[in-house]
Image: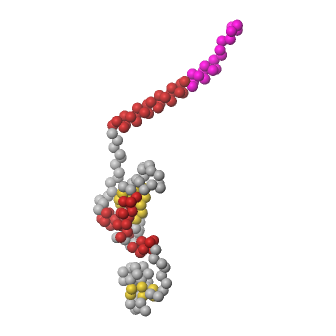
Amino acid sequence: MTLVCPGCGRHHAADERFCDACGVPLVHHDAVLPPETELREKARKVRPGYAEGPLTRVATARHQAEAELLQGLLLEEGIPSLVRRSGGFDVPDFLAAGPRDIVVAASGADAAREILGVPARMPLRPPAARPAWVRVLAVVLALVSILVIATFVVGAALAQGAQRRPSPVAGATL
């Protein structure tokens, strides 16, 4: 009767008790194993040593498809990862457009950076450099908005003042 590792699926001799590769207790080959699903297949690939610690950003992808490709590369090496939307990009969540951050546990961050060819420290995203004309346009629009609002406020105040002032009545004596 042969024994099988439920973790990696390797076959072992009847006198062995634990898997050489992953250290999981062996089960009889005849035992009913749960059906292989995509989720179970992914979980089998994860190395527990790479799943410890707080989440750390290791790479940035331009869109969802690129993020899933990087996530697959990391999973093939046993590094579990998550994809999350990068902050500051104004696109509805149901669209695949927009940058994504690839995050992994701190214990797998160095290995993930090495696999993806990313420098040891991810540079912070520099603030978007806007041309001078954009800044000038923003200031002009702000000033015009202030002037329009001030005009309406002053106009409303004058109109209320005119309504409160008694109108001269013909034939009235002072």
93 sits to left or right of 21: right
Assign the N terminus to one quadrant of the image. Answer: bottom left
| Horizontal and vertical percent position of residue 73 | 35, 66
Assign the C terminus to one quadrant of the image. Answer: top right
In the picture, residue 4 is in which quadrant? Answer: bottom left
| Horizontal and vertical percent position of residue 93 | 47, 54
| Horizontal and vertical percent position of residue 100 | 40, 56
Q: Residue at x 35, y 52 (%)?
A: 124
Q: Residue at x 40, y 58 (%)?
A: 64
Q: How is the image coloured?
A: secondary structure
**71 falls in the magenta region:** no
| Horizontal and vertical percent position of residue 116 | 31, 63
In the picture, residue 42 is in which quadrant? Answer: bottom left
Segment colored magenta: 156-174
Q: Residue at x 40, y 53 (%)?
A: 98
**168 falls in the magenta region:** yes
Q: Is residue 37 above or below residue 87?
A: below
